[in-house]
Amino acid sequence: METISYQDVNSQVIDKCKEGDNRAQYELYKLYSKAMFNVSMRITNDYSEAEDVLQEAFISAFKNLHTYKGEASFGSWLKKIVVNAAINAIRKRRSELVPMDERTIGDIAEETYDDDSEWKVEKVRKAIMKLPDGYRVVLSLYLLEGFDHAEIGDILGVTESTSKSQYSRAKKKLLEIMKEPQFAV
Amino acid sequence: MRDKLEDFVSEHRDEFDVFEPRPDLWQNICQEIPAPEKEAKVINIKFGERASFSADFLFMRIAAAVVLLLGCGLTLFLMKQNAPDANTMMAASQQQVISNIAPEIVEVEAYYVSEIEEMKGELSEYDKKILGLSGQKEIDRELARLDSSYMQLKKQLYTTPNTEEIVEAMVQNLQIRIEVLNRQLEVLQNIKKMEKTINAELKENETTNI
């Protein structure tokens, strides 16, 4: 079977990086560092930890660039590395990342959005940062990083349905936080 | 069915990325990226059905390798004995080429290099740590940077048609180095002077107090 290789806009830059070209490496870094830093920030919720993760992830990405064969976009390949590094980082500081109880989604009531007209990016973003780690990670991965529940399950070492239910609870909690008086900006 | 939160986020996805890593983080990363390794090419010869071939001839292969190595070693040894040191020869011939391309730079370089060495000698007489001079690292880095760009310029000399420009840049590079070292020397001298006056004042105070 023919494998469709993803035509990356950066493929030339990436080839140069594989040869160890410093300038090309910096170019890639410039291109992706901000987005990747935000991914790392959302998972670790800690500026200096997020920087450590970013550093570690980029170093490991450049070291293992030869394993990148262009089967996905470079951005999503890199994002996987960042996400894994970030999750390792918070696992190190806490014993358990996702204290999952295996309840199913069924027993969680459908959320009601009664004041969604007032949503602002800043408000939602700050509310996400107030979520406990387990909730924040699943919610960020799904909502912002675009992973599906099967992928999140793989990343966190849980089942797909656990990821789903965890996400529902996280969302519910998020909406509660946004209703708190100090959040009514 | 998509829900409102998801729609909201995907609509404003870019606005969620508000953080920036500190700008000098790249330096840290850059330092830890390993230098590119030349990919080792492994030639695989498959014998298919006759896979046992390789095992049977293992002894022969080792023997062949040993013979080859011995041979190479011997020739190298003999060559070394006969020929003068290859490195010095290379350097000498390079110098020759440069003096053909740009005769003036040879002299200029020798002059500045001796000047720089002298200043470095003077500088090393000061104990920078005791004087609390910060920024030594930056100065060293700057000098290293200058050195590497100088090397590059020197390489360009062989290929460029416009030697004058390159030579000018090389001289400028050497002058900047002198300037950097001069500044540092000045700073150190000032610190020394200040220390002396402070010490003198202290002594004076002591004597007046008594």
Image (cartoon, coloured by chain):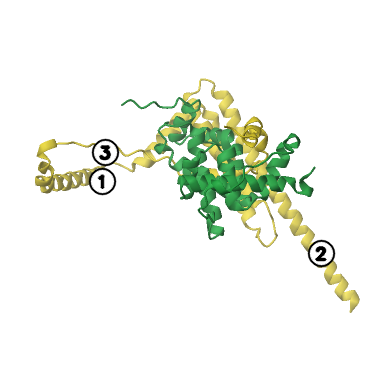
Chain colours: A green, B yellow
How many C-alpha atoms fall within 10 Å of the one at disc 2: few (<14), some, or many (≥20)?
A: few
Drawn side of residue A42 relative to residue A164, left or right: right
In this view, the mark in front (3 or 1) = 3
- Identified by mark 1, the residue type is Gln
Chain on which label 1 sits: B
Tell me how far mark 3 sits from mark 1, CA to CA: 34 Å
Q: What x and y, as percent, mark residue B57?
A: 10, 44
Chain on which label 3 sits: B
- The quadrant of the image that shows the N terminus of chain B is top right
Residue B198 numbered mark, or none = 2
The residue indicated by pointer 1 is: B81
Closest to the observer: B185 or B110? B185
Q: What x and y, as percent, mark residue B139?
A: 64, 47
Closest to the observer: B20 or B24? B20
- Identified by mark 2, the residue type is Ile
Residue B42 numbered mark, or none = 3
Q: Earlier in the sequence, mark 3 or mark 1?
A: 3
Q: Is residue A171 visible?
A: yes
The verdict on a common chain for dots 3 and 2 is yes
Q: What x and y, as percent, mark residue A166?
A: 55, 48
Closest to the observer: A33 or A105? A105
**Does A92 sit above or below residue B5?**
below
Q: Earlier in the sequence, mark 3 or mark 2?
A: 3
Closest to the observer: B23 or B204? B23
Residue B36 quadrant: top left
